[in-house]
Image (cartoon, rainbow, N blue to C red):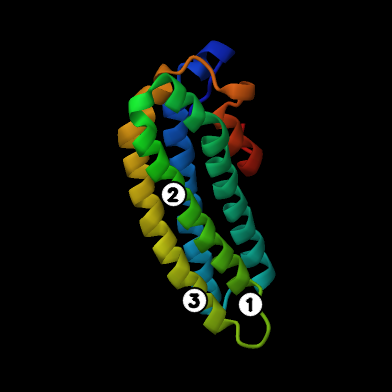
Amino acid sequence: METFTGHGDRLAAFGNQLIAVHLWLREELARLADDVDTFLEGGERPRELRAHCLTFCSAVRRHHTEEDDAAFPALAEQFPELRPVLEELENDHHTVADILRRIEELLGGLGTGEGALPAQEVRKELDGLAALLESHFVYEEKKIVAALNGLSALPGGVVLQDVIQDVSGQD
């Protein structure tokens, strides 16, 4: 992941940070799908699978919350022509949140005697989530990365890179 040396570097690279966060989320989603597949093949314990999934779900929620609460309002203010795009992206965030809730509910059934059935449903939900997130990420990157890189600041001093560092433990 790209390292930023100072506050000015971080401000000049919001769009680049967004891409880095998206790459990390894609990797984590692929790892999570692999974990579910391993469980379906008789591997990893449900507790570890649930923990990984809940961590991933938390990371996605936090990323979307930071966008909705900080990045998107700043973009809408400085680039009003992006408002329809930002509304569409926020709508995607709601759809993603619904899928994450379904996944978490299904995870509650793992390890209760019929672990394979909920795990198969989790895998189906993850496949749908992966398709939606890929489309969302590509659209978001295409439409707003240049504008994000043009921002001078986000409200409250939010730095998008901090979202990924807080959740992943990466520096």
Q: Is residue 168 left or right of residue 67?
A: right
Q: Can residue 60 be seen from the camera position used here? A: yes
Q: Amino acid at mark 1?
A: Leu
Point out residue 48 in the picture as x, y percentages from the top left corner: 66, 65
Residue drawn at (44%, 26%) of the image: 75
Q: Residue at x 53, y 17 (%)?
A: 153
For the residue pair 46 and 106, the one nearer the viewer reads as: 106
* Residue to which mark 1 is pinned: 110
Q: Secondary structure at mark 2?
A: helix
Q: Between residue 50 and residue 80, name the one nearer to us.
A: 80
Q: Which amino acid type is marked by label 3?
A: Glu
For residue 82, which quarter of the picture?
top left
Distance CA(mark 3)–CA(mark 1): 11 Å
Tell me the SS state at disc 1. Answer: loop
Q: Which residue is mark 2?
A: 91
Choose the circle earlier in sequence order: 3 or 2.
2
Q: Residue at x 55, y 67 (%)?
A: 103
Picture coordinates of residue 43, whole percent (x, y)? 58, 75
Question: What crowding class fits label 1: few (fewer than 14 Cα within 10 Å), some (14-19), or many (20 or more)?
Answer: many
Q: Which residue is denoted by mark 3 in the rendering? A: 121
Q: Can the viewer see residue 1 in this picture?
A: no
Callout 3 touching callout 1 (CB < 8 Å): no
Answer with the quarter of the image where residue 30 lies: bottom left
Q: In the image, what residue type sits under mark 2? A: Asn
